[in-house]
Image (tube, grey):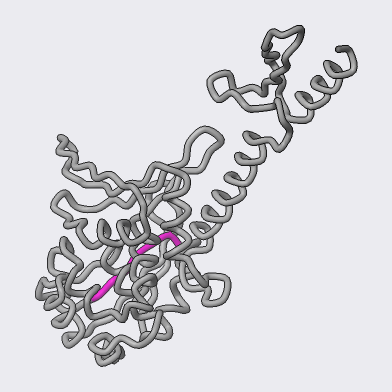
Amino acid sequence: MKNKIDCKQFINIKNSEVAYFLGFLWADGCIYTKKKHSYLIQITIVSDDFKYLRPILKKIGDWNYNKYKPKPIKWKEKTSAAAYSKELVTWLYSVGYINKENPHNIINIIPIELRKFFWRGLFDGDGNVTCTDKTETCGIASSYNQDWSALKDLCKELNIKYFIQRRDRDKGKCSNFGISNRDGIINFLSFIYDGYNTDKIGFNRKYKKLKMLVINKDKYLKRRTSTHRGIAFRKDKNKWVVFKRINGIDKQFYGFISENDALEFQKTLINNV
């Protein structure tokens, strides 16, 4: 393989694909230093996701691709992209890609308007979103010594509450940067995937999680708030309740699954009083 990647586009970052690639490489890429594979840059992911990564790599340079099926039957087919570049690897090492624990140097040379693509790439590589009827969580996993300061600063700018966990177990060490409240998750994902419908840079399945979160929030708000006086939702009982003053006594009527059921019951009370 020959060097077919122009390093100048990294030293002077002007396009979103390069910013995204740097984030994804930080999360899920390898740079080899052994003599046999010196100056080799490689990314290997499941083929279903690689179809979104290939157009980005194509705009950066020429890569060698390899598709294969891992031996465990349950494992999905994978695709790898590799390229040799002494100049680029040397530059990547100079900005923190040796141990990939502190991204400050690389973030500082990315123009502010393109930094969302770095975070998008990093999240596509190491991020996860859980979205169910009962819980919604968002996190980024990394090495135990990962410096999360840059991400903490971003969350402070976006007014997002976060938590950091570091685990030291028999199977290995790791750390996790997490967001556990719905509004914070939506704000974070809305920032990094801003403009995705137009630029199409990144994994569609993770962008869909953002859309699902927004839909669930709308459903949640509609289900748990009411414009009708005397009707409310009790979270502790997970039911709607009707409040009515009858003969000078305040009474509460529980057990309604939907707001419409509560509204119909309220009408019945009014007609009977």
Q: Quadrant of the C terminus?
A: top right
Q: Residue at x 39, y 66 (%)?
A: 120
Is residue 44 found inside the magenta-colored segment of the image? Answer: yes
The answer to whether 64 appears left or right of 91 in the picture is right
Residue, far right: 271
Image spot of residue 255 (x, y percent):
69, 16
Looking at the image, residue 110 lies above or below residue 47: below
The answer to whether 208 appears left or right of 169 in the picture is right
Is residue 107 found inside the magenta-colored segment of the image? Answer: no
Residue, far front: 248
The answer to whether 201 appears left or right of 215 in the picture is left
Q: Residue at x 42, y 65 (%)?
A: 192
Image spot of residue 1 (x, y percent):
27, 85
Q: Residue at x 48, y 64 (%)?
A: 203
Q: From the viewer's side, name the closer residue of 76 and 24.
A: 24
Q: Residue at x 85, y 19 (%)?
A: 270
Q: From the viewer's side, name the closer residue of 129 and 98.
A: 129
Give the main secondary structure of the magenta stretch.
strand
Q: Image quadrant of residue 104? A: bottom left
Q: Image quadrant of residue 10? A: bottom left
Image spot of residue 150 (x, y percent):
23, 62
The answer to whether 247 appears left or right of 212 in the picture is right
Looking at the image, residue 173 lies above or below residue 125: above
Stretch of the chain drawn in magenta: 41-46
Image spot of residue 53 (x, y percent):
44, 71
